Image (tube, helix red, strand yellow):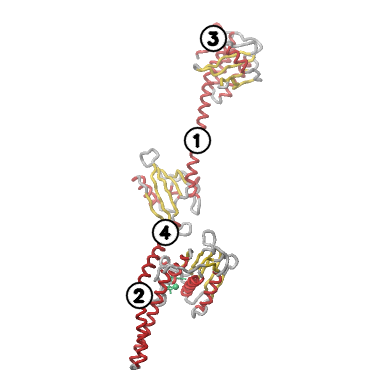
Amino acid sequence: MAPVARLTPTSLQPVSPALALLSDVAAHLAAGGPIEDALHKVLELLRRALTAGDCAIWALAPAGLTRAWGVGDGATTDTEISALLEAGELSNNRIVLARLIAGERLLGVLVMRVDRSLDSEERIVLATIADLLAPAIANAEHAQQMAVEVRLRTQQIEEQRRFTEKIIDSLPVGLYVIDREYRIHAWNRKRETGIQGVSREEAIGRTIFEILHRQPAELLRGEFDEVFATGKISTFQMESSATGDLRTFRISKIPMRVDDMNVTHVITIGEDMTDWRQAQDRIAQAEKLAAIGQLAAGVMHEVNNPLATIGACAESMSLRLEERGADETLRQGFTDYLRIIDTEVHRCKRIIDGLLDFSRPKAATKVAVDVNAVLEETLFLLKHHERFKRMSIVRELDRETTPLAHGNAEQLIQVFMALLLNAMDALNGRGAILVRTRRGRPGEEPVVVEIADEGHGIPRAEMTKIFEPFYTSKPPGRGTGLGLSICYSIVADHDGRIEVDSHLGKGTTFRVLLPAAHTEGTA
Ligand SMILES: Nc1ncnc2c1ncn2[C@@H]1O[C@H](COP(=O)(O)OP(=O)(O)OP(=O)(O)O)[C@@H](O)[C@H]1O
Ligand SMILES: [Mg+2]
């Protein structure tokens, strides 16, 4: 410790209290802990040992001298200290200074307020203490700067982390990241929500097999291992009914390289594709129907004319038979054949008319229609139907809040009639049909008509086929399979849509959703 060498052996005796002070100071500085505390203790020691007034350390800040640490009342001013320093003096009759120099740099001064002049030993002690303090202060300054920098960097990193977390939390997909030990490192908000949601706290640090314990671990491991091994994105679709209804997810497993070399993590993203898939199915269905419609329209024109000719021929043949007065048995046979021809021709014409209804571009004028009135009209027409008479109809018609629909009453009668006849067929003589109207809920069109039966229901596999022309499950001669396809095209032409809910053995609900009329008024 070089500065202590300023004390000469001969001066050692009288300065032993000063030496004790120095060693106390050195001990305080070496003790570690907050530098402020150590400096306060040193200043206190100085004050007591040298019986000075206040003792302070003034730091050389960019704006000039400022008091950094002190004991006492701190009455000395920086102008007084600066004046002394400028004059190259170390004391006046009020204060004594010792420069704090670390390396080449003047850090500040140690200032003591005195009412007497210090003797030479005291000045040496003071200078030595200043020499001891200077590196300690320089270190403290450095440590403080470092601490500020570390705090700043930590803050930046924390902000960055929170920002990244917000990004992955804002994604409308489920996302998690695992490492090579299959431990979870990230788990986004979407994965926390829903029936199968697991909180982030619970998931982070655990293995994926512990968290996704419903999925077969071996299968899951295989999926991750493939991405670790190949370094390629793997995408597949998965169906899950964990939330109650069947939903389709697109799962992507994406390799991630922390060191830009080997795959260190795998990011898994799960997107709910159910709505998209249903929309795709609807588009495909509409396109298919449109194509069938075009084809049918072409064929129908070709078939209609020969049919008309056959019908006319059959009719004139039966007239001729009447005129000629043929042999009785021959006549009976011919009449039977001709009646069969006539019935079948009519049946063909019915099918053709139906198909043309389905395929012809609809130009029916649409006005504001009260669907309640249209339903009543349909039920009135059906009242005369032999089998319908035996059915019990439950009406839940909401006349208060259901808006008027934008539509064509005749066409809508056709739709409701087809749905009611189907319901009747499904009931097979037993049970009731519920006819309901209501205002559309959010996500639905404004006008909703429901026709629900307690019949045999529709098997899942048949659901996509029922709107196709000629699809029928009814015995030959009973159904043409055109009812629903005509409904579909009429409702589509109304810018509405038809939904079906069906449970085997329990019943079926057909829901017709229609846009509201733009203007007030009834059909
Ligand atoms: N309410 C319902 N309950 C059960 N199955 C139904 C219901 N409505 C329709 N279906 C099924 O959808 C098929 C197609 O119906 P669609 O109305 O198009 O033809 P259809 O009733 O068989 O014949 P059409 O109506 O031309 O006389 C039916 O054969 C039946 O299998
Ligand atoms: Mg039908």
Query: Is 366 on the left or on the right of 260, as rendered?
Result: right
Tell me which numbered mark, 1 or 2, is placed earlier along the sequence.
Answer: 1
Mark 3 residue type: Leu
Q: Which residue is mark 3?
A: 7
Q: Secondary structure at mark 1?
A: helix
Three-letter amino acid code at the position of disc 1: Gln
When the figure is inspected, residue 490 is found, relative to residue 69, above or below; the finding is below
**Crowding at mark 2 (Cα within 10 Å: few <14, some 14-19, many 20+):** some
Q: 110 or 350: nearer the eye?
A: 350
Quadrant of residue 182 in the image?
A: top left
Q: Residue visible at 49% across and 16% down?
A: 104
**In the displayed structure image, the side of residue 261 where residue 79 appears, left or right:** right
Spot occupied by residue 51 in the image (x, y as percentages of width and height)? 64, 14
Q: CA distance from mark 3 to mark 2?
A: 129 Å
The spot of residue 307 in percent (x, y) is: 36, 78
Determine the secondary structure under disc 2: helix
Is label 3 in a helix, a strand or a loop?
loop
Q: Is residue 304 at least partly visible in the picture?
A: yes
